[in-house]
Amino acid sequence: MSKVTIIRQSPLVLIKRIIEVDIAASVILFFISFITNFEQIFRATVGGFFSRYDIFIFVIASFLQLIITLIVFFIWQSEEFRLKEKEISFRRSFFFSKEKSILLKNVTLVEYKRSLLEMMLNYGTIVLHTGENTKPFHIRNIETAEIYSNIIKDAVDRALLRKVESPKRHSILDLIIEGESSRLELKQTFRWDTKQKITSKSIEHSVMKTIAAFLNSGGGNLIIGVTDNGKIYGLEDDYQSLVRKDRDGFENHFNQVVKHTIGAQMRQNINLIFEKIEDKDVCLIEVESSLTPVFLTNNENEEFFIRTGNTTSPLKISEVNSYIDSHWGK
């Protein structure tokens, strides 16, 4: 892992902290009220500016609530976990800097846990153990926590020079975390329209456009079952839309779509890898660059696509020949 992976806690942590600080402040003020008469202090100091004590209390309470919320927000915003090649660290840079780190080679166990609230909100907690007499390192309330836990496990394995059992698993997880690029696209489904709750040829066509573009542009990867922002959606809706409702049924249908849109001969350039993440199937489609131009058939019309940045772009007829000459040579 040559780069740093940033892991941030979800807004759930912010909400919990605001509630905790509010409760603590209320308890403190409650006990102080037994030894101090707030109204008497009010009358002796600022009573001349406010005609009513209850209005004064409301204004002060609102102001304190605002200050507490802002302070807790900026502290939460400044916090992050940083996963590097040899260590994982926690950093906070607001008010006073704080940093705590542990070496990955010292990690003996990586646990993935979910409280009832985290399960309801689809969050999770990662716990790193470094020995019997040391306090565990917690990464709490993280979105896609299971993905991050597996990435950390693989990083620990590499740090300990142990053989990684599933390099493909690590590869898929890393791809999802990195997000879309010129060589990677994420699709929520292959053929199921999540809004209209029906199968959609246009969604299938969108997937095949991306594959055709990768074939024409040096190759790439497409992951189906993941939303644009990296959340695991799964293939269950696609499965249920097929005659055979499993991975084999998915691949069989995929093969038929490839045959009728870009040609069966292109299937040798495409590799499908299924994997279960967060108890949901996802499919990684690895696409190798084609040695010849690939046209996509759509309603008896032929279309030509390439990758430009992180998007799939069609070429006009007048542009196709020029691209073919520059990409494959005359």
Image (cartoon, rainbow, N blue to C red):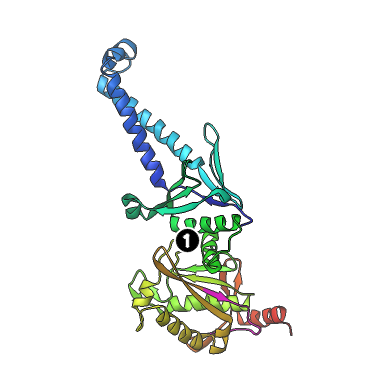
Query: Magenta residues, as a range?
Result: 285-296
Q: Quadrant of residue 211?
A: bottom right
Q: What amino acid is at disc 1?
A: Gly
Q: Is residue 59 visible?
A: no
Quadrant of the image for the C terminus?
Answer: bottom right
Does residue 98 appear to the left or right of 202 in the view shown?
right
Residue 2: give x, y in percent of width and height: 64, 56
The residue at 47%/41% (across/down) is 133
Residue 73: give x, y in percent of width and height: 44, 39
65 above or below 86?
A: above
The residue at 64%/81% (across/down) is 320
188 above or below 98?
A: below
189 above or below 71?
A: below
The residue at 27%/17% (across/down) is 51
Majority SS type along the magenta span: loop
Q: Nearer the viewer, residue 298 or 160?
A: 160
- Does 287 lie within the magenta span? yes
Disc 1 designates what residue? 230
Q: Is residue 174 visible?
A: yes
Quadrant of the image for the N terminus?
Answer: bottom right
Residue that sits furthest to the right in the current view: 330
Residue that sits furthest to the top in the current view: 44
The residue at 52%/31% (across/down) is 95
Residue 113: give x, y in percent of width and height: 39, 53
Residue 146: give x, y in percent of width and height: 44, 58
**Is the residue marked by circle 1 packed among few (<14), some (14-19), or many (20+) residues within 10 Å?**
some
Provide the secondary structure element on which disc 1 rests.
Answer: loop
